[in-house]
Image (cartoon, grey):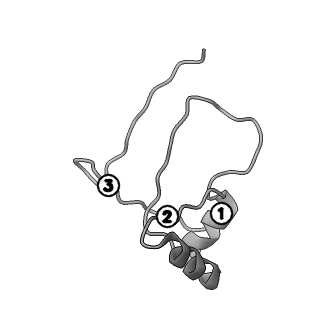
Amino acid sequence: MDEAVRIGLEAANGKNLEVFSPDIGRQLLALGLIDEIDLHIAPVLLGDGVRLYDNPGGAPIRLHGLGTEDPNGAIDVRFRPA
């Protein structure tokens, strides 16, 4: 996995290397190879599929917010079923 990230970063030539796979993202996170996580919240509840960074029985991973007043604070969003 380290080698794949190294090759990807070289190919990115100084730009961001983005990962769009929850399984690979989870593996990279466990290996300490993730610098930053962008979470995009869409107002849709999916009934099936792969959970983002699913890690049954694993320890919680705390995130530090970027661009917020309180980097450890929660961000609340509210939706109503359409």
Q: Camera-side residue: 40 or 9?
A: 9
Report the disc number at residue 66: 3
Expressed as whole percent of the image width and height from the top left, the position of residue 10 reads 52, 78
| Mark closer to the chain start, 2 or 1 | 1
Type of amino acid under label 2? Ile
- Helix, strand or loop at label 3? It is loop
Type of amino acid under label 1? Asn
- In the displayed structure, 77 sits above or below 64; it is above
Q: Which residue is mark 2?
A: 61
Residue under the image location 43 percent in, 32 percent down: 77
Expressed as whole percent of the image width and height from the top left, the position of residue 33 reads 51, 75
Residue 6, by quadrant, is bottom right
Q: Which residue is mark 1?
A: 55
- Helix, strand or loop at label 1? It is loop
Q: CA distance from mark 2 to mark 3?
A: 16 Å
Asked if disc 2 and disc 1 are in contact, CB closer than 8 Å, the reply is yes
Expressed as whole percent of the image width and height from the top left, the position of residue 36 reads 43, 63
Whether residue 32 is visible, yes or no, is: no
Give the crowd class for mark 2: few <14, some 14-19, many >=20 residues within 10 Å.
few
- Depth check, mark 2 against mark 3: the one in front is 3
Q: Camera-side residue: 7 or 61?
A: 7
Report the disc number at residue 19: none
Quarter of the picture holding the N terminus:
bottom right
Give the crowd class for mark 3: few <14, some 14-19, many >=20 residues within 10 Å.
few
Q: Residue furthest right?
A: 48
Asked if disc 3 and disc 1 are in contact, CB closer than 8 Å, the reply is no
